[in-house]
Amino acid sequence: MLKRVLITGAAGNLGSLLACRLSDDDVCLHLLIHRKDVIPELKAKDHVHVFRADLAVPESLNEALEGVDTVVHFAGVLFKHNPEKFLATTNTRYFKNLLDRAVRKGVKRIILISFPHVEGETTPEHPATGRLDGSPVSVHARTRLEEEKLLFEYGNKHGFEPVSLRVGMVYGKGILMIEAARWFSRHALLGVWKKVTGIHLISTDDFLEATRAAVLKEGINGIYHIGDEGVQTLQEFLDEATEHWHTWRPWRMPLWMINTAARGFELSSRLFGVKSPLTLDFVRIGRVSYYGDTSRMRKELLPRLKYRNFREGLETL
């Protein structure tokens, strides 16, 4: 019998990329969407089934979870004003709804897509190691940490395999944050704060292969940091990316100027219902250096990287 895999947020950026990658495997895919639909190429495949549901309504999840072995959870709300007002609901409460229904349906493994910021500031010398006692400064990271705690509490209580993939910044063509940076740099509007900020990167190809392994391999359980071998700063990455694109180099801006821009984007989002590509909480989380210990990933999920660092992967930008 084919393994059944449910992807929540399957019409979103990373969720849709994983759906496309897994659609070539010998699995039965259940794709959970809310408003936006998946691409027609996925819907045309016999082993792909699309379900429209709402994580706020637990009963709406029953059909999508029927017979499912593994859940990969991407669904969430981004690029909206005042995230501190809704993230406790859309991250924590909605995830609890999913966990409750998944337990009732006998799901064997639940994979949460997280990020290393949940441990607070980390560096290559003192990397994130899979702790759950961090004190992150941003609402995005605090609520994601609460999701992780819920995941492992439920897994320990109900006997399924809880997996958290703490993913560094994914780069490549089609990644929303990368495409936003490209657009802003093309129009000489890309800015970055002066404070040097370390980041851990992973190419789209390597992210998808590591996540695919977490779905398909036996015995996967616990926290895995997903990142490459490169050590660099956000400023270095943006400088070299814009040079590769032949666009304007990012301006070094004082923090007050970036925060003012974030307030402007959030105001437009609130008044006109449009997306906010920058929020004050994005700035807050973005200024935190992060780096994860990838030894478990290399041992159990992805022994060999396609791109060891972003300079090898510049061609994918």
Image (tube, rainbow, N blue to C red):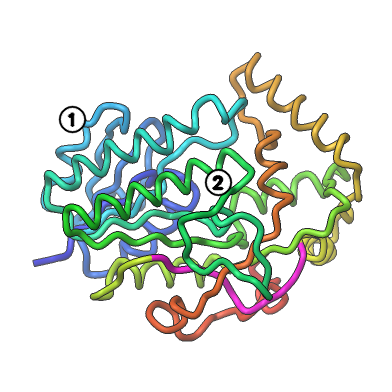
Q: What range is drawn magenta here?
A: 223-233
Image location (x, y in percent) of residue 193: 84, 48
* Distance between the alpha carbons at the discs numbered 2 and 1: 28 Å
Q: Can residue 251 be seen by looking at this rendering?
A: yes
Pick whichever, 103 or 78, lies toward us.
103
Say whether residue 232 is magenta. yes
Q: In this view, does 288 lie to the left or right of 61?
A: right
- Front residue of 215/121: it is 121
Q: Would you identify the image quadrant in which residue 68 lies? A: bottom left
* Label 2: how many Cα within 10 Å (few below 14, some 14–19, many 20+): many
Residue position for label 1? 59
Measured from the top left, where is residue 20 in percent x and y? 38, 59
Q: Mark 2 is on which residue type?
A: Ala
Secondary structure found at label 1: helix
The crowding category of the residue bearing disc 1, from other C-alpha atoms within 10 Å (few below 14, some 14 to 19, many at least 20), is few
Q: Image point 88% across, 35% down: which residue?
A: 257
Question: Which dot marks residue 250?
Answer: none
On residue 141, the disc is: 2
- Residue for point 66% across, 41% down: 282
